[in-house]
Amino acid sequence: MIASERKPLEEILGYLESERKVFLVACDGCSAGCGVSDPEHTAEMVKELEANGKTVTGVARVEMTCNSGLAALMLMQHLAQVNEADGILVLACGDGIQSVAGAVEKPVHPGTNSVYFGGFQGLWRSEPKCAECGNCMLDYTGGICPYTACSKSLLFGSCGGPKDGKCEVDASVPCGWMRIYERLAVLGRVDELRRTPPLRDFTKMLPMKDRRRSSLYALEYEVEEAEAPAES
Amino acid sequence: MGLREALATEEFVITCEVAPPKGVDMKHVLEEAELLRGRVAGINVTDLQAAAMRVSSVATCALLRQMGLEPILQMVCRDRNRLALQSDLLSAYVLGIRNVLCLTGDHTVLGDHPAAKPVFDLDSVSLLRAAQGLIDGHDLSGNELEGKPEELFLGAIVTPCADPVEPQLYKLHNKIEAGAKFIQTQAVYDVEAFARFMERIPEVKTPILAGIVLLKSAGMARYMNANVAGVFVPDDLIKEMAEAGKKDKEAKERGEKANNVVKTSIEIAARLIRGLKPYCAGVHLMPLGWGHHVPAVLEGARV
């Protein structure tokens, strides 16, 4: 499970600045459970977009968007609406957003931050796509996460290391930034590389207070409810 | 004259790198630096190059300052987070160091402590931004400084022969926008390829110093072609080095002394510098242990 929270509306509208028609993908998995992409909050998102002059061409609900095959199949069912849109806004975890970005040749924007939950080591996971960094940068990078795709987690483009498009750390692994570059080239958005996103904030990877108070934590830890006594 | 002043003139500018030792015997590195006195406008000091643990660039640069030389502090983002990087910039400044070359740095797994934690909290672009912020009087958190390091002179690198080169161009522009005032490049062995690169960036007014790495053998050239990103040694240069190596081997078999390899290496470097001169503000030499041959290269290049 990956926990998500909604990005602020201003940030989302910033991503959509040059786009009028938007298709929405909402995940029915973890992020729905987090109250981000469930039907009620998805409808709210649609309303907010429309209130800000956007046309929502359609909404696809995908059971588990991280399953890229399933995400592609669901998008196929909305092909006309997807094609009509200038870009796609995804309410899912960073993994799900990258599934959608990999399935369509349109700008894909994150509507969420995947927040660090910690402590789910027992679960089987596929390739590590989402770092749960709490500061989703997928809008800048053509829907490929620079934190997980680049060995150095670089945010501002490739280092001097890639040889023949492969990473200096492991020649069998494609350079994440080369993938981002190629992806942006396909989308005709290479100029994104001139945008400089804000620095990564590592405090966003500390488990959040309200999550520490959740029942999931309570199962493992005795949660201190009482506040620390005031210093005398 | 400092590096900033040298680059402001119309003169062709030479810089050269030296490498601190693994251990505390500074004799060799300081001798190599001394050899460069009066011959170069700045001396780069590498920062744990190839991710190998050594004496720091800051300490070595401070010693060069004491000798009245002009150091260029290389700073990589592999080993320090944003607190330590900013602190070291201030520390270097109070030790009299003014020139800083900002780099991302090789990954830890390529070095001699592969199990170390790679940091990369910042990268070349954000380090430049952080340093420019310090110059302007505030740190990355916006806190005001007591005394600004106003004379910091920031540099960055570019790989002109990278394939594809477009991502390099975007990053170059981002680096200049972030505060880079001079550019040094990865090794160049093909004058025409470099000229083509320069033709693509007519809008860039920041001085660019083309990188020159001395070839030590044909084998080294082949190794770089196979393994080093953005470095391409053309076949004719490899052939020249191979022939020189063959001559030396034959002389050795006859019991004679010969140093055709060194002579050819110096000749190639000098020829490259003469060829590159019309296209750039200067050259940056990376002798990789052959620092004692640098004077001969510069004499051969007539610069």
Image (cartoon, rainbow, N blue to C red):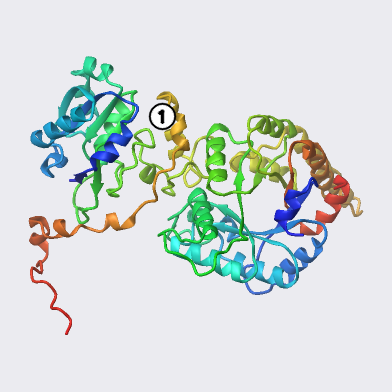
Q: Could you tell me which quadrant the N terminus of chain B lies in? A: bottom right
Q: Is residue B51 above or below residue A143?
A: below
How many numbered marks, from 0 up? 1
* Residue at image coords 61%, 64%: B57
Disc 1 element? helix
- Residue at horizontal 29%, vertical 44%? A130
- Tell whether A146 sits left or right of B157: left
Q: Quadrant of residue A25?
A: top left
- x and y percent of residue A224 in the render? 10, 69
Q: Is residue B236 visible?
A: yes
Residue A225, position as x, y percentages in the image: 8, 68
> In the drawing, does residue B118 fall left or right of residue A42?
right
| Residue with the mark numbered 1 | A183
Q: Return the x and y of residue A230 as percentages of the image width and height.
A: 15, 78
Q: Is residue B287 visible?
A: no
Relative to B58, residue B164 above or below: above
Q: Nearer the viewer, residue B104 or B65?
A: B65
How many other residues sit within 10 Å of disc 1, few (<14), some (14-19) or many (≥20)?
many
- Residue at 17%, 25% in the rendered image: A59
Q: Position of residue B222 (x, y in %)?
A: 67, 40
- Given the image, on which type of amino acid does mark 1 rest? Arg
> Which chain is home to disc 1?
A
